[in-house]
Amino acid sequence: MSTVVLITGVSRYLGGRLAALLSADSSVERVIGVDLVPPRQDVGRTEFVRADIRNPIIAKVIASAKVDTVVHMSVIATPFGAGGRAAMKEINVIGTMQLLTACQKAPSLEKLVVRSTTAVYGSSSRDPALFTEGMEPRSVFRSGYGKDSTEVEGYVRGLGRRRPDVDVTLLRFANFIGPRIDTPLTRYFSLSVVPRVLGFDPRIQFIHEDDGVEVLRRSVMENRRGTFNVAGSGVLLVSQAIRRAGRPAVQVPSPAVAVVGSLFRRAGLVDFSPEQMDFLQFGRGVDTTRLREDFGFAPAYTTLQAFDDFVAGRGLTRYIDPERVSDVEQRVLAGLERRRTAHA
Amino acid sequence: MPEARVIPLDGRDSSHTAPRRSRRAAQCEAVGADGKRCTAKAVAEGVCGEHLAEHLRAEAAANAPDWERKLAGALAFMRRRVTGDYPIDDFGFDPDLTENVLLAAMRPLYEKYFRVEARGLDNIPSTGGALVVANHSGTIPLDAMMTQLAIYDHHPAQRHLRMLGADLVFKSPFVAPLARKSGSTLACNEDAERLMSSGELAGVWPEGFKGIGKPFSERYKLQRFGRGGFVSAALRSGVPIIPCSIVGAEEIYPIVGNVKVLARLLGFPYIPVTPFFPLLGPVGLLPLPSKWIIEFGEPIPTDELGASAADDPMLVFNLTDQVREVIQQTLYKLLLGRRSVFF
């Protein structure tokens, strides 16, 4: 039973929503949020501590407040907000190391929940259709989010070995999507013309922001030890997703993709990292049987519904309007019918 | 009065939802989108005033000439494509595209060009997982596509053959998305087992590049059957193995040479030289119109052996050899019965 919960990365969207949910729950005694900047959204009665998790102050917070549950969600996916790849790695890997060191020394700790990502499986042509939790990546990481997350997971497993009394829940989330969350992929699908890799059409999976927050909440409130893939059921093809968003696509040959990606990055439109290029070429799918059966949670939104909710909730203008398309179809059919009745 | 049949405008058969006319036509027979029958009283043609216009339109559509119905079907298909309104399974299989475009494009080749004769289709179960294992030949995997079409068009259950393809297929631009959309997935144990245990019909060509790229002088001589991975996958899923022998594909592009240097440079397993390619340029790309026979043999059950048998290498080797031998013998038998390569 969690009573004092510490959340890292509380000023980011998902951290803030989890903090708000937990502070609305009367069985949670205290919620402590840690981040470098104060939260912008309403986080209820969460006590905010402005601290860097790389700072030893975090150990003091955990010890003095007798924190029993730590939710680590401050691993960042893009170097854009962090101020470069080196800083991103520093925050992700060194930050996690420091936080876990503090956790290991805290006798009050009972539970650790870590937000990880399905990017740890990589993206390549040799991938199986769906990854289960026990599978290893088939490609070698050069750098980036996937590599950082793999290292973070390594440290988390290390803590699990050294503190067997702590329940460790490792959640590997697919790409988040929804009406409010801001990720490189939501920006990508909001572009007025969406570039994609010529000759490839990867499968992608989404998890709706509401489902994701609910999985995090349950991991805190209930005991769900283990590693779980978290994704909405089913897959979408990138081409199909672009069509459902009603956007025109332009196909970029793969040698030019890196150049186009860095142009978008410089323009501040979408923060594409090289591994996201691989993702847009080969995609990824994960198996969520363990989430449904062992964790006991079935996401309310399928991948397709989550994407549609994003398109509707953002109010994206569908340049290729499905209503107009079916209108044209009906008109052609009506024309045929008129012609037939005129002949009859 | 003739029975009214509602022909759906998107060209799909839904005769089971067509309203049946009862003798005592007092209640309107229209069925709403929610599947419930209209409760109003019928005024004419067995339907109420509200549904009369719709009913007449449907009846008119039923009498529409064939091309108009086809056009309506094509329009509905295009609408689905443009708006992204079609289902994709976990492997990336797109049945809408496969049935309406990819298989339709292969059909003339199947029926008119290679005049494929499919035998022993009743050896393929109508439901449940199974593994079709076939010989590979012909420089490009036309044999796989023809086998897929043979099963879809001529098996009573219209099953889709889910093929297991090489790594190179999923690395190549344009080929990779088409392969996934037509139901293929990577030939690895995880995918094979996932397909078969979810009740799909999987297809594998275990000779791989050694088979498809072998010289013409070695035609119909089966190469090594991989490492028997397909047998252990079938054993773990407990599905039957159906040997499949394909005659005719060897002659479509007779390989007389291989430009190994160029192949290594481009990263291909081989660059074939045939009597017509590259000598005649693009004309040389035309396959020779051989006459094909695809014979599906009797299923070899694996469920009695149990999943643990997959860990017994001797058993896996023996079973692999057995499947290979059945296909080789069937090939010899079919070749003996063949009048000529082209007829």
Image (cartoon, helix red, strand yellow):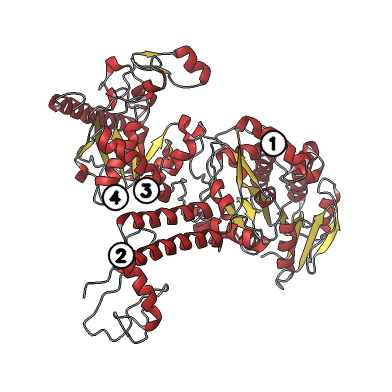
Q: CA distance from mark 2 to mark 1?
A: 52 Å
Q: CA distance from mark 3 to mark 2?
A: 23 Å
Query: What amino acid type should be assigned to the residue bearing mark 1?
Result: Val
Circle 1: is it few (<14), some (14-19), or many (20+) Cα within 10 Å? some
Which of discs 2 and 1 lies nearer the camera? The answer is 2
- Chain containing mark 2: B
Query: What amino acid type should be assigned to the residue bearing mark 2?
Result: Ala
Q: Residue at x 23, y 72 (%)?
A: B3
Question: Could you say which is closer to the camera, residue A337 or residue B247?
Answer: A337
> Is the Cβ of the residue at disc 2 closer than 8 Å to that at disc 1?
no
Where, quadrant-wise, is the C terminus of chain B in this rendering? top left
Q: CA distance from mark 4 to mark 3?
A: 10 Å
Q: Is residue A103 left or right of residue A282?
A: right
- Chain containing mark 4: B
Query: What residue is disc 3 on?
Result: B99
Specify which label sits upstream in the sequence, 2 or 4: 2
Is B263 above or below relative to B125? above
Q: Residue at x 23, y 85 (%)?
A: B24
Q: CA distance from mark 2 to mark 4?
A: 25 Å
Q: Is residue A204 left or right of residue A44?
A: left
- The x, y position of residue A90, in whole percent, is 79, 40
Query: What amino acid type should be assigned to the residue bearing mark 3?
Result: Glu
Question: Could you say which is closer to the camera, residue A105 or residue B335?
Answer: B335
Q: Could you tell me which secondary element the residue under label 2 belongs to?
A: helix
Q: Residue at x 33, y 68 (%)?
A: B60
